[in-house]
Amino acid sequence: MSTISKYKETQLRLFKKESVSPVSKLVATNGVVKNVHYLEVGQGEPLILIHGGGGNTDQWVNMIKRLESHFKLFIVDRPGCGLTDAFNYRGIDLMEHCVAFITSFMQALNIPSADFAANSMGGYWTALFAMKHPEKVNKIVLLGAPAG
């Protein structure tokens, strides 16, 4: 069994334990990171959840049950995390990269604007995106202090 298969199997056991059923999806984007993994579940207005450094979509599992009846959740793996394509950060403008990543993810899913919840490095990415594209951000919840 491959590492990815083991990861997916473990993820499904975690979802079952928490009595949630998000759908694991990959979307092709026009951004520098071509294949972005995310979990989708729920109904209502879009809420994009962005994890911190070293995390992945699974860190939001205990929030899904509380949020899925109020929002359509898009729980995204940042580049190089979880099942999203790897990315070499050497020599890039991190601020531009953060904004471009979120922009390309939203464009690929045809999400014109959304609420956001994020923590740590995900909070940093979200804050940068909101400063550059306030028209695409309805509300932000930063859990803990954003990086930076």
Image (spheres, rainbow, N blue to C red):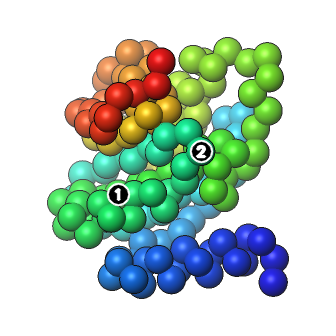
**Residue to which mark 2 is pinned:** 54
Closer to the observer: label 1 or label 2?
A: 2
Report the side of 13 relative to 2 (left or right): left
Q: Amino acid at mark 1?
A: Leu
Q: Indicate the quadrant containing the N terminus: top left, top right, bottom left or bottom right.
A: bottom right
Q: Position of residue 96 (x, y in %)?
A: 60, 18
The local crowd at label 2, few if under 14, some if 14 to 19, many if 20 or more residues have their Cα within 10 Å, is: few
Q: Residue at x 73, y 70 (%)?
A: 4
Q: Position of residue 136 (x, y in %)?
A: 35, 30
The local crowd at label 1, few if under 14, some if 14 to 19, many if 20 or more residues have their Cα within 10 Å, is: many
Find numbered disc 2 in the image and state the secondary structure of the residue it sits on.
Answer: loop
Which tag, 1 or 2, sits closer to the chain's start?
A: 2
Q: Position of residue 6 (x, y in %)?
A: 70, 78
Q: Amino acid at mark 2?
A: Gly
Whether 129 is drawn above or below 142: the answer is above
Where residue 59 sits, quadrant-wise, is bottom left
Q: Residue at x 65, y 42 (%)?
A: 79
Q: Which sits in the foreground, 109 or 139? A: 139
Q: Residue at x 64, y 49 (%)?
A: 81
Q: Which sits in the foreground, 148 or 118? A: 148
Where residue 73 sits, quadrant-wise, is bottom left
* Residue 73 tag number: 1
Report the side of 100 relative to 122 (left or right): right
